[in-house]
Image (cartoon, rainbow, N blue to C red):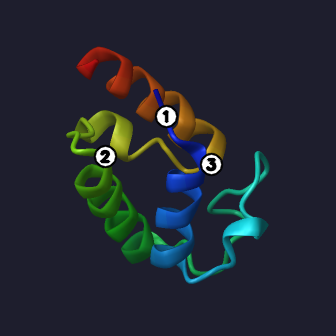
């Protein structure tokens, strides 16, 4: 099961934003530090924190908090 607080904390640290500012509308479009380098660092941090491997096709597509939740939820449910 996905711990959303942990997800927000990882995103906040990598993207250098306040965790409380991350919500369903958060995406690459509205977080200035979420550029291509920030995206790669976020993918690596998520994989490390949640002990998963995000497939390349998913890694390129998860450009919002909402999509990250969907992909991580599927991956974590598959692990459990």
Q: Is residue 77 above or below residue 44?
A: above
Residue 36 vs residue 6, the one in the foreground: 6
**Circle nearer the N terminus (2, 3):** 2
CB within 8 Å, label 2 to label 3: no
Residue denoted by label 2: 50
CA distance for labels 1 and 3: 13 Å
x, y percentage for residue 36?
42, 70
The residue tagged with tag 2: helix, strand or loop? helix
Write the residue at 42% across / 65% down: 39
Residue 56 vs residue 3, the one in the foreground: 3
Q: How many marks?
A: 3
User: Of circles 1 and 3, which is in front?
Assistant: 1
Write the residue at 30% across / 55% down: 49
Q: Is residue 64 above or below residue 36?
A: above
CA distance for labels 2 and 1: 9 Å
Which numbered circle lies on residue 2?
1
Q: Is residue 31 above or below residue 65?
A: below
Which numbered circle lies on residue 58?
none
Residue denoted by label 3: 65
x, y percentage for residue 61?
46, 41
CA distance for labels 2 and 3: 15 Å
The residue tagged with tag 3: helix, strand or loop? helix
Give the quarter of the figure containing the C terminus: top left
Quadrant hosting residue 75? top left
**Circle nearer the N terminus (2, 1):** 1
CB within 8 Å, label 1 to label 3: no
Residue 54 vs residue 9, the one in the foreground: 9
The residue tagged with tag 1: helix, strand or loop? loop
């Amino acid at each position: 099961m996905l711990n959303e607080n942990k997800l927000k904390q990882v995103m906040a640290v990598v993207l250098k934003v306040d965790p409380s500012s991350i919500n369903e509308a958060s995406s690459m479009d509205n977080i200035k530090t979420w550029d291509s380098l920030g995206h790669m660092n976020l993918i690596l941090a998520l994989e490390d924190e949640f002990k998963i491997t995000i497939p390349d096709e998913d890694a390129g597509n998860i450009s919002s908090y909402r999509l990250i939740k969907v992909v991580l939820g599927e991956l974590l449910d598959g692990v459990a």
